[in-house]
Structures are given as structure tokens and as C-alpha cells.
Image (cartoon, coloured by chain):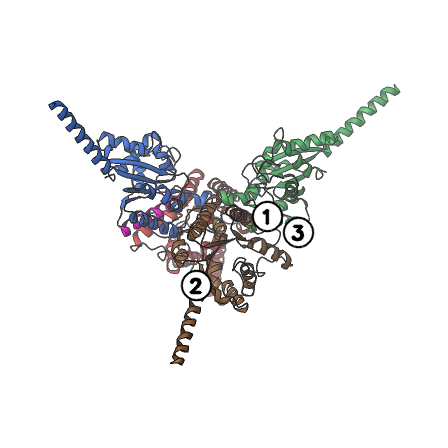
Chain colours: A brown, B blue, C red, D green
Amino acid sequence: MKQLLVFFSFVVILTLLSAFTFIQKKKVVFFGDSITQAGVSPTGYITVLQQMLVKDGRDKGFDLVGAGIGGNKVYDLYLRLEDDVLSRKPDLVFIYVGINDVWHKKTYGTGTDPDKFEKFYNKIIDKIQDAGAKVVICTPTVVGEKKGFVNELDGDLNKYSEIIRNIARNKNVELIDLHKAIVEYINANNPEDKAKDILTSDGVHMNDKRNQFLAEQFYQFIK
Amino acid sequence: MKQLLVFFSFVVILTLLSAFTFIQKKKVVFFGDSITQAGVSPTGYITVLQQMLVKDGRDKGFDLVGAGIGGNKVYDLYLRLEDDVLSRKPDLVFIYVGINDVWHKKTYGTGTDPDKFEKFYNKIIDKIQDAGAKVVICTPTVVGEKKGFVNELDGDLNKYSEIIRNIARNKNVELIDLHKAIVEYINANNPEDKAKDILTSDGVHMNDKRNQFLAEQFYQFIK
Amino acid sequence: MKQLLVFFSFVVILTLLSAFTFIQKKKVVFFGDSITQAGVSPTGYITVLQQMLVKDGRDKGFDLVGAGIGGNKVYDLYLRLEDDVLSRKPDLVFIYVGINDVWHKKTYGTGTDPDKFEKFYNKIIDKIQDAGAKVVICTPTVVGEKKGFVNELDGDLNKYSEIIRNIARNKNVELIDLHKAIVEYINANNPEDKAKDILTSDGVHMNDKRNQFLAEQFYQFIK
Amino acid sequence: MKQLLVFFSFVVILTLLSAFTFIQKKKVVFFGDSITQAGVSPTGYITVLQQMLVKDGRDKGFDLVGAGIGGNKVYDLYLRLEDDVLSRKPDLVFIYVGINDVWHKKTYGTGTDPDKFEKFYNKIIDKIQDAGAKVVICTPTVVGEKKGFVNELDGDLNKYSEIIRNIARNKNVELIDLHKAIVEYINANNPEDKAKDILTSDGVHMNDKRNQFLAEQFYQFIK
């Protein structure tokens, strides 16, 4: 009888604990393009983030979810916001988009005008905040890794980064200035002035060993 | 006394009739780009439609509303669908968009990919139908009026017209094939093979006397 | 002795004939882009033309030379006109260019403006004619094989074809209207309305069995 | 009599000197786009250069000729090199081109690929040098005057400037690094970070009072 009581107490405590854990576990959604789609691969930046959380013993507190689709621009995120983000009832959403909005101007003639970029971006933030989640936004990384802003799209990437920095200020949301960070990293680590192979495999997508770099940029914002 | 009774009966009947009319008055929204924005001007196609309704004594039955903004592409319509269309509780919505989706590829590098065009278009239809309104969709008119498909964007405009025709079939919504109608009109009425001044003032926007043409295409669908 | 005389007479006649043939052998240069570059491959259209000449016993009269380079636009031809064509002292030059002038607008933002296209084209003809050679010009083939001018670039390809037809008229040079021929062929032979695999392997480049089609268009102009 | 002799000697010497001067007068051609076309206007940079020469008493030594045409790209210069430059038998040619090669990618889809840009540029230099003239080449100025490389085309303008700097090195010709000079000037003189009105009236074309800036960049190379 006493054993049974102990057993039941144990069950109750476990249940309470797991309930507690369940309640506390924050859902973190990474909302973006092909870089984020690759982020959940075995070496991707979201996987690295997960490993960092494990190492720090913080992994019980967070549920990291990748919601990246290749080729996505800001308005593609808006189109699938409800299905891929809000329906998951996130606590925290990272928005990491902008490269294709610039790049596709050149490759397909289907990039995004800067004023439209800003409009859709703001509306996405509004809808996520209305759903009660916190938003952290990121400037785009790079297309080409040469130094001195001589990569063809550097001017436009700087311009869209500025737009995102202004949105962060105006909306008072946290900003991960990936563009600034990656440009500084490249300036310090690209002595031969190569167009790729510093942080990226092709000028755009993170190479395996460098997902660490990206993960570190996000890490402190997972809280 | 008898006269007074007659008078009051008349007032009551009128009131009932107007109430009935008020209840019956259908809200018709024209959702589109600069052509629709200009549609509500004194000579615009929506104004001409209104005059046609008056002439036929049908104007009491319909409330025509213009919801066009210059430069809009399909995703711009999606962004402002709630505010500019659904909030008005329409009975009937005409979607007339597509020129800028093609044209801006060339002029700004910010057109719309065909697969994205289709996705946003379908989603707009779904949301309008979910709100209980009927949808009628239109193929885009033209950019340039030369015959024989020698205008630079003719191929792509044909392609996007095909996409819209397929959407109409798949979703079983009514279609106004403006592109077909205008191409036929131009073939029959442009003996000198001019690039503009047949139905348009600049190759794109309707000239004043020709809003009649556009209004006639819409007229039978106002019911 | 008599036999020897006969033999020698025979040799002399043969020598004279071959000398005559040698003198008469016309140098024919095909000046163009990747389609012409592939034209000299074992199944290419220039190789097929050579085989047609052999079959008709006319091959001794002509020396066919391919001068195609992938990605070339009209101004690229102009840049290498001296080195790749005029230095070979041709009797007849086919100019077959225009697809990349249209296509690269979309894929790289580096197509050719129509007025510039015309200017360079005219200058190339002038320089070849000044060098004493005959010129035959061709309209561009296609990008995509769907019917009804719904391929994205159909309008612009029609436009540039018109420019070339006008050049032929104005300069009084012979024209091979490849664009017209291929569009007619596709209309008659593409019942499933496929985007490729009728005459091309990818919408642009001739598939092996269909180089015959292209060769036939050129054949009558080799004279 | 002696005085007369002295006088005549003086006249003869003067005549000889002026003849000598006439022979020595160097023909300087400015070969470029709309900026150079506007350079010969009453306030244009070539006019300002002429005034600087007058002020320094060096105007007798040089004949400044503008050969700029609006919208020109590197291959347009190549097309009219013979007619507009070489036929004038220049001693010195400034090549100042590149903005439209970058800009028209976006506005018309008809910019110039970097490898083609280099090829045409080199060929122009070769032909001018073969004609016995000296060549001085210039990096392009700007499209937009905001600081920190946030103007849309800054990356590509930097890239094409690098191409020109490399050509100068490889061909051992003198370079006027206008791009570097104007960027430095803007960084120092645009405290409000405006997009135009610092050195340009529209982000591209020099405003009146600032043609002085451009003229000063060229001045020391007129020798």
C-alpha cells in the first residue's frame, strides 16, 4: 500500500514536471529562404544551434523549428505565414529573408521593390506580434565574398540591410545584423579576396564548417 | 382623409421599396492596378459602367467601387485584400491584374514569377470566396498595340493570360478574357499597325473614348 | 604509246578540272551563336548541309566553315568579324544571331536594345559586303516551343525578327525566315503543345534528328 | 633699315613660332556617354577644362573635342570609334564609360556582361594606340550619392571600376580613378546622406557648379 502510494506520488511528480517542462518549452521558428531550409540539415545552422543548447543544458527549454523554403522572398513568407508559422503557435520567430529579393532582380527579373519589401516585412512583423510571439529580424547575408563592396549586388544588399535596420528601429524589435557581421568577418578572413569559400560554398549558401558562424549570431537571441 | 391615407400608403410603399432596394443593392468591387485606379475618373471604365447601368435602369441594384492602385502586382492585391476589399463586404469582386507582373520584369527587375503569380491569385480567390463573395477574373490587357504578337511582352502576356484561363477552369469562376478581346479588336482596327492610340494612349492605359470598350467587356458580368 | 597519250590527256584534263574546281570552290561562313557552334558537331546543321552537298555532288564547289560562339549577341559578332570571318576571305556569309540579344535581357540583364541591334547588324552587313562577300541573313529561331505565342519571349523574338526582315528589305539581301518556318513547323507538329522536344532539346538548341530541318532552310541559299 | 630687318626677323620668328605652335596643338578627344555629351555645354566639364587651360595660358597647345553620346555603353563606343575618334586623328583620348553598362541591366535589361565589357574596352584601347594616340581611361562615377555603398548599383559600379583599374595595369595606360575620387568626395561632403545634389543633379549627371570637380580630375592628364 505504501509502495503504491510512493509509486503514485512519483507518477504525479513526473506528470507535474513534464507538464511544467511542456509549459516552459518555447517554440522558436526560423522563417526564411534556402539558407534556413538547409539550416535543419545535419550540419545546418539550426542543427548547430540545437547542439549549442544541448551543450549548455538549455535544450529542454526550446523547441527549434525550421520554416525555410528555397527561393523565398519577403512576400512568399507573407503568403505562408499563417500555415507555416502562426499555426505552430510560436513564442519566438526569427525572420531571415532578403537575399532573393535582391538577387532575383538580376537572375529572373522578379526581385522585390524596396518599398514593397518594407511593406510586406512590416505586415509580417505585425501579424506575428498580434499572435503574441516575439520577433527578431536579420539583415541578409551576402552574394559573393569579395572585399571592398565589389560584388555585383553589394550596393543593393546594403540598401535592403538598411531598410531592415530601420524597420528594427521603428518597430523596436531586436536585430541580428548578419550582413554587418559577415562583411566584417570576410574583411578579416579573406586575404586572397576570393569570391566564395570563406563562409559560403557558392557565394551565398553557408559551407558546412561555417554554419557555426551563423549559429553564433543567433545564439544569444534564443532566450 | 382618404387622400391622406393614399399618401401615407404611398410613403410606406416607397419606404419598403427603398428598403428592399437597399437590401438588394449589390456591392461590386473592382480590384486591380493603375487601369482600375483610373477607372473611377470621370471618363474611366467604372464610370462608364455606372452610366450604362443608369441607362438600363439597373443602377439602383449595384454599388460599384474602385479598388485600383497604380503599379500593383498580384501580391500587392493580396497584401491589401482585407483592408480594401473584404472589409467592404462585397457581393462581387472583379480581379483585373497581371500587366505589372509581366512589365516590371523588364522595367525594374521586379516582376512576378509565373508559379508565384498563380499561387497568390488562387489564394486571393479563396479568401474572397470564403468571405461569401462571387469572383470574376480577367486576363491582362496589353503593353503595346502592334499586331502579330511583335510587341516585346506579347509572349509573356499570353503566358500569364493562359495561367489565368487555367485558374478560371480549375476554380470554376467566370472569366473575362480581356486579352483575347483586345487582341482581336486591335487586329481588326489597327490598319497602320501602330504601337498605341488604338485602345490605349500609351500602349497600356485606356484612352478616353475607348473606356467604352473595356466597360462593355465587364457589363454582362454585373448581375 | 597511244594508251600513254590517252592516259596523259586524261591526267591533264583531270588536273585542269580540279584546278578549275579549286578556283571555283566557294568559302561559305556560318556566323552565329551556340546553335552555329554546335552546327559543326557530327550531327550539327552545318554537317548535315555538307552531307546534302555530297549527296547532290555539289560538295566540291563549297567549303563550309562554322564561326559560332556560344552566348554571342550581335555586337559580339561585330567584335570578332575581322578575325573570324573577313580574314577567311569568304564568298558567302550567313548571319544567324538574335536569340541571346533577346534572351539575356531576362537571364542576365544584358540583352541588346532593338535600335542597337539594328545598328550593329547593318554595320556587319556593310563590312562583309565591302569585303566582297555575299550576305544572307536569318531571323532567330525560338525560345520555347509552345504554340500560340505563349512562350515568354515570343513577343520580343517576333519584334527582332521584324527588325531583321526590315534590314533584309532595306539592304536588299536574301533572308532565311527561320523564325517563321519554325513557328509554322511547331504549329503543325506539336499536338500536345509541349515546351520543348519538337525541334529543340531544351526549347532553344536543335535536337539531333531535327538539324535536318535547319539544314533544309539553308540549303537552297548555298549557291 | 636695321630696325626694319629686326622687325621682319621678329615677324618671321613669330610666324614660325605660331606655325610651330599650330603643329604642336594636340587634339584631345573625350570619348563617352551623356556626361561627356553634356561636357561641352556652357557649364560642362570640358568647357571648364578649356577655361582652366586659358587661365594657365596653355590653351594654345590643346584642341579639346567632346565625343559623348547619351546612353552609350562600351560597345557603342567601339561601334563609332572610327567615325567619331580615329577619323579626327587625336593625340590623346580619354575614355570615360561604364555607368550605362551597369545601369541599363536594371532599367532595360540591356547592360553589358563584365567579360564583354573588358573585351570591348581592351579592343578600343588597342585601336586607339594603333592609330598612334595616347589613351587615358576613367572609372565610372556614380548612380546615387548615398554613403556607405548603399546605392543599389554600388557593388556593380565597384566591380566595373575594378575591371577598369586592372585594364590600366595590364595595358600600362594612365588611369583617372573618378569612382574613387567621387566616393571620397561624397563621404566628406554629404553629411545629411542625400541621394543626389552633392556632385550630381539626379544621382548621375554632374550639376553645374560641380563640373569643376570633374574638370580637376582630368586637368593634370592634359599634357
**Residue B151 sits inside the magenta stretch:** yes
> Residue lying furthest left in this view?
B2
As displayed, is residue C218 above or below residue A62?
above
Q: Nearer the viewer, residue C209 or D8?
A: C209
**Residue B188 sits inside the magenta stretch:** no
> Residue lying furthest front in this view?
A2
Alpha-carbon distance for marks 3 and 1?
15 Å
What residue sits right under mark 3 in the picture? D170
The residue under the point 68% across, 46% down is D173
For label 2, the crowd category at 10 Å Cα-Cα, with few meaning under 14, some 14 to 19 and many 20 or more, is: few
Q: Which stretch is magenta?
A: B148-172
What residue sits right under mark 2 in the picture? A23
Q: Secondary structure at mark 3?
A: helix
Picture quarter containing residue B54?
top left
Q: Chain of mark 3?
A: D
As displayed, is residue C6 above or below residue B33?
below
Give the mark count: 3
Could you tell me what secondary structure mostly forms the magenta stretch? helix
The amino acid type of the residue labelled 1 equals Tyr
Residue B110 screen position, x and y as percent: 45, 46
